[in-house]
Each structure stands twice: as C-alpha cells, then as structure tokens.
C-alpha cells in the first residue's frame, strides 16, 4: 500500500515536471531556426565562436539564467544588438513571438544546440 502510494506520487511529480520544464520537439526546432536565421545570418554570426559569450556553455553551467538571457535579447548590451524583433521575424511563421520565441531559443541552447530535425507535426 505504502509502496504503491509512493509510485503514484512519483508519477504525479513526473507529469507535473514535464509540463513545467520539457520543451517540445517543435519548441526546439523553431528555436534552432530562430538561432540560425535571426538577422538573416543567425546568432552564431557572433556567438558560440571566438571571444563573444558562449551561450550554450553559459546556460549549461548556470551562469546565464533565462531572465538574464531574455533581458539581453530584448535590451541589447554593448555590441550585442536588440534581437527580439529579429527573432519574432523568424518565429512568427510558426506562431513563436515574444517570450515564446525567446524561450524556444533558450531551450534549444539548453539542449546543446546543433542540428534539430523538423518535427513530423
Ligand atoms: C552582431 C553580433 C551579435 C549578434 C548577431 C548577436 N549577438 Fe548576442 N551578444 C553579442 C556580444 C558582443 C555580446 C556581449 C555583450 C557584452 O556583455 O558586452 C552578446 C551577449 C549576448 C547575451 C548575454 C550573454 C551572457 O552570458 O551575458 C545573450 C543572451 C545574447 N547575446 C543572445 C543572443 C541571441 C539569442 C542572438 C540571436 C537572436 C544574438 N545574441 C545575436 C553579439 C551579438
């Protein structure tokens, strides 16, 4: 009895956490498209090469939170241009604008970047 309760509690936790945290395949795919195509040339024109911040590494090691990521993307920072409009331009074809577009790119980078296959649906 106790054991089955614990299993049920575990299942509930799993369902809740997947709803809160898991990015869908579509999120990752659109995120990758935005990362590749914003400003025409993509974020990687400047990022994840050479001396500019390595976004994937900084997100993975916890030094770049979603709120910092979002603030920099919206406001720009020194040589980093304001990017929200450029991201919306790419994402809006799939219904990804504003926070949803920014979150998709953050989730894509959190998942390690790289090539994402287009989801079936
Ligand atoms: C023209 C070059 C350029 C492009 C294009 C560019 N960035 Fe940046 N970005 C920078 C530079 C330079 C910085 C460092 C700014 C500073 O701290 O002085 C930066 C910083 C950032 C930061 C803060 C990183 C940290 O660890 O503090 C984020 C987040 C970011 N960029 C996201 C993006 C995203 C997402 C895109 C594509 C939509 C993008 N950038 C496109 C040049 C660029």
Image (cartoon, grey):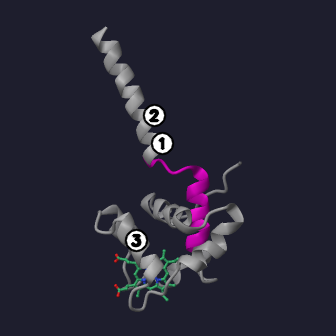
Q: Which mark is residue 15?
A: 2
Q: Earlier in the sequence, mark 2 or mark 3?
A: 2
Q: Earlier in the sequence, mark 3 or mark 1?
A: 1
**In the displayed structure image, the side of residue 11 where residue 37 appears, left or right:** right
Q: Nearer the viewer, residue 25 or 67?
A: 67
User: For the residues marked 3 and 1, what is the alpha-carbon distance in whole angstroms?
Assistant: 22 Å
CB of residue at label 3: within 8 Å of ligand 1? yes
Residue 43: horizontal and vertical position, in percent?
A: 52, 78
Q: What kind of element bears circle 1?
A: helix
Q: Which mark is residue 19?
A: 1
- Displayed-image quarter of ligand 1: bottom left
Q: Is residue 63 above or below residue 50?
A: above
Circles 2 and 1 in contact, beta carbons < 8 Å: yes
Q: Nearer the viewer, residue 33 or 12?
A: 12
User: For the residues marked 2 and 1, what is the alpha-carbon distance in whole angstroms?
Assistant: 6 Å
Reading the image, the residue beneath label 3 is 69
Q: Is residue 17 above or below residue 34?
A: above
**Residue 70 lies in what quarter of the image?**
bottom left
Considering every residue shown, the one lying at the far top of the view is 1
Residue 24: horizontal and vertical position, in percent?
A: 56, 49
Specify start and end residues of the magenta stretch as a single range. Answer: 21-35
């Amino acid at each position: 009895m106790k054991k089955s309760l614990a299993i049920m509690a575990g299942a509930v936790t799993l369902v809740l956490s997947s709803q809160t945290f898991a990015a869908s395949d579509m999120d990752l795919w659109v995120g990758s498209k935005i990362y590749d195509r914003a400003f025409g040339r993509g974020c990687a024109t400047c990022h994840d090469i050479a001396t500019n911040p390595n976004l994937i590494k900084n997100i993975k090691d916890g030094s770049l939170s979603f709120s910092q990521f979002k603030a920099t993307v919206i406001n720009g920072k020194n040589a980093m241009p304001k990017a929200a409009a450029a991201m919306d331009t790419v994402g809006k074809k799939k219904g990804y604008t504003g926070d949803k577009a920014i979150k998709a790119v953050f989730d894509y980078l959190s998942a390690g970047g790289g090539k994402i296959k287009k989801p079936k649906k």
